[in-house]
């Protein structure tokens, strides 16, 4: 694959993590979970097919589907894409897709006039069947078969008569659509790295002068700047581990020389370590940030990951901040979670023009972000934040519910911005 225009390159595999740094690797682990969540709730945007050979398909072949829905057997190949759909009807139904070709195929059910996708099945292997459950209204539809290393083939257009409202659908997004918002976001990150460098310089100066009280204040300010740049962490490469790495969850891991960055300094500031003991970690953090700043203009973010990162940031906050797994003494996980919401908002700002016409629940998503951030702000008292372990049960349940709701509302965003073949 050749490089994309305008300074955007195709996605590259992530570097392998090493040493005690787990922050970088966990971002990719969480990304896999985000994909799973997105697939699980795509009914709010696209109705996705189930995986594997289908018990519904077998039941349909026997004439007795066990889900109570009408089933239609559909052939998938370049020569017979969509064959079998002879009795169009509205409503919720199942198409049992059977790949009769010799290669794997993606299958979309779309409106051939608008390109909007109503359902999809990825990776349908030769000789296998999988169900595609959809909710169709009145309109025109066609199956599109995209075999590996072959042009897309669109089957015959089928018209569902009547005036039944159409079900959920979304226009596909391609990589070129995502290049402008990715470039804009990358520029925004570059500006934040400048703020970060100013913050780590101030933190280093505090520690050099032995003012640990000021260092605790300035540590949080700088750390939150970093936590707002969540979509860029994977592009940061090894710098993420050096800047914001965490220690292994084993005795003595905080003493490992490979434990560096914000959390290493946090541990020292809130566990009685002297300024002398923290000078080297502070200098190393500041140097890592300046190295990142110097090389950022040469980095290339993956446009195809933008929608997923919006979900992944909140997923990481739920997994690591709301559980206090990354608390090394400051008790500021809720501040970090709020900064993570800022990070998701920063991505959505850039994606908004593409998202609004594809996702009817954008206003509800905005309200959910506001609600979650307000509930976190209620735990901010002057210069202090309530530590996670000091929340009441009601407070904890409310915040957890906020983030659970956000994950559900952001999963369709990840699905919408999954780059799809259309030709």
Image (cartoon, rainbow, N blue to C red):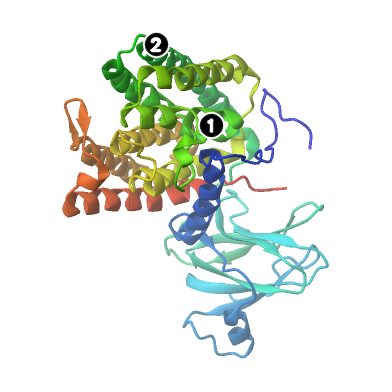
Of residues 106 and 340, the one drawn nearer to the viewer in this rendering: 340
Tell me the tag on residue 208: 2
Q: Residues within 10 Å of mark 2 (few under 14, many from 20)?
A: some
Q: Position of residue 38 (x, y in %)?
A: 49, 54
Q: Position of residue 54 (x, y in %)?
A: 61, 77
Q: Residues within 10 Å of mark 1 (few under 14, many from 20)?
A: few
The structure residue drawn at horizontal position 57% and vertical position 80%, both measured from the top left corner, is: 56
- The image quarter in which residue 337 lies: top left
Against 141, residue 59 (above or below) is below
The structure residue drawn at horizontal position 29% and vertical position 51%, both measured from the top left corner, is: 400
Q: Position of residue 159 (x, y in %)?
A: 58, 64
- Judged left or right of residue 275, residue 146 is right
- Judged left or right of residue 408, residue 358 is right
The number of numbered discs placed on residues in the rendered structure image is 2
* Disc 1 to disc 2: CB gap under 8 Å: no
The structure residue drawn at horizontal position 22% and vertical position 37%, both measured from the top left corner, is: 374
- Judged left or right of residue 213, residue 246 is right
**Label located before the other in sequence (1 or 2):** 2
- Judged left or right of residue 79, residue 170 is left
Of residues 353 and 14, the one drawn nearer to the viewer in this rendering: 14
Against 335, residue 184 (above or below) is above
Q: Position of residue 91 (x, y in %)?
A: 46, 70
Classify mark 1: helix, strand or loop: loop
Residue corresponding to mark 1: 257
- In the rendered view of the protein, which quadrant contains the N terminus? top right
Of residues 364 and 274, the one drawn nearer to the viewer in this rendering: 274
Of residues 359 and 410, the one drawn nearer to the viewer in this rendering: 410
The structure residue drawn at horizontal position 62% and vertical position 84%, both measured from the top left corner, is: 58
Q: CA distance from mark 1 to mark 2?
A: 20 Å
Classify mark 2: helix, strand or loop: helix
Residue 204 visible in the picture? yes
């Amino acid at each position: 694959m050749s490089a994309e225009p305008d300074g955007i390159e195709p996605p590259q595999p992530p570097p392998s993590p090493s040493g005690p740094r787990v922050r970088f690797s966990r971002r990719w682990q969480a990304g896999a979970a985000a994909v799973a969540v997105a697939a699980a709730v795509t009914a709010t945007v696209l109705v996705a097919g189930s995986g594997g050979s289908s018990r519904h398909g077998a039941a349909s072949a026997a004439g007795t589907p066990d889900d109570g829905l009408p089933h239609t057997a559909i052939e998938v190949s370049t020569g017979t894409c969509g064959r079998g759909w002879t009795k169009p009807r509205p409503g919720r139904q199942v198409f049992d897709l059977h790949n009769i070709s010799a290669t794997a195929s993606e299958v979309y059910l779309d409106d051939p006039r608008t390109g909007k996708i109503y359902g999809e099945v990825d990776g349908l292997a030769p000789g296998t069947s999988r169900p595609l459950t959809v909710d169709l209204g009145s309109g025109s539809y066609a199956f599109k078969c995209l075999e590996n290393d072959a042009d897309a083939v669109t089957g015959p257009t089928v018209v569902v008569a009547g005036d039944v409202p159409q079900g959920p659908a979304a226009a596909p997004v391609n990589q070129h659509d995502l290049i402008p918002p990715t470039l804009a976001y990358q520029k925004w990150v570059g500006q934040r790295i400048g703020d970060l460098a100013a913050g780590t310089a101030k933190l280093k100066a505090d520690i050099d002068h032995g003012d640990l009280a000021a260092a605790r204040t300035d540590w949080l300010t700088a750390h939150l700047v970093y936590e707002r740049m969540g979509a860029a962490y994977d592009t940061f490469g090894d710098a993420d581990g050096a800047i914001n790495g965490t220690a292994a969850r084993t005795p003595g891991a905080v003493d490992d020389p490979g434990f560096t960055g914000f959390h290493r300094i946090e541990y020292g500031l809130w566990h009685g370590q002297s300024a002398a003991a923290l000078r080297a970690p502070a200098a190393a953090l500041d140097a890592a940030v300046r190295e990142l700043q110097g090389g950022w203009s040469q980095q290339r973010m993956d446009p195809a990951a933008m929608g997923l990162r919006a979900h992944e940031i909140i997923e990481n906050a739920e997994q690591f901040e709301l559980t206090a797994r990354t608390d090394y003494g400051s008790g500021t996980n809720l501040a970090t979670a709020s900064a993570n919401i800022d990070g998701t908002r920063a991505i959505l700002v850039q994606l908004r023009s593409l998202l609004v016409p594809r996702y009817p629940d954008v206003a509800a998503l905005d309200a959910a972000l506001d609600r979650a951030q307000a509930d976190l702000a209620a735990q901010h008292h002057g210069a202090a934040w309530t530590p996670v372990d000091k929340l009441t049960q009601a407070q904890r349940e409310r915040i957890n519910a906020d983030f659970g709701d956000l994950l559900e509302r952001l999963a369709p965003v990840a699905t919408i911005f999954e780059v799809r073949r259309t030709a």
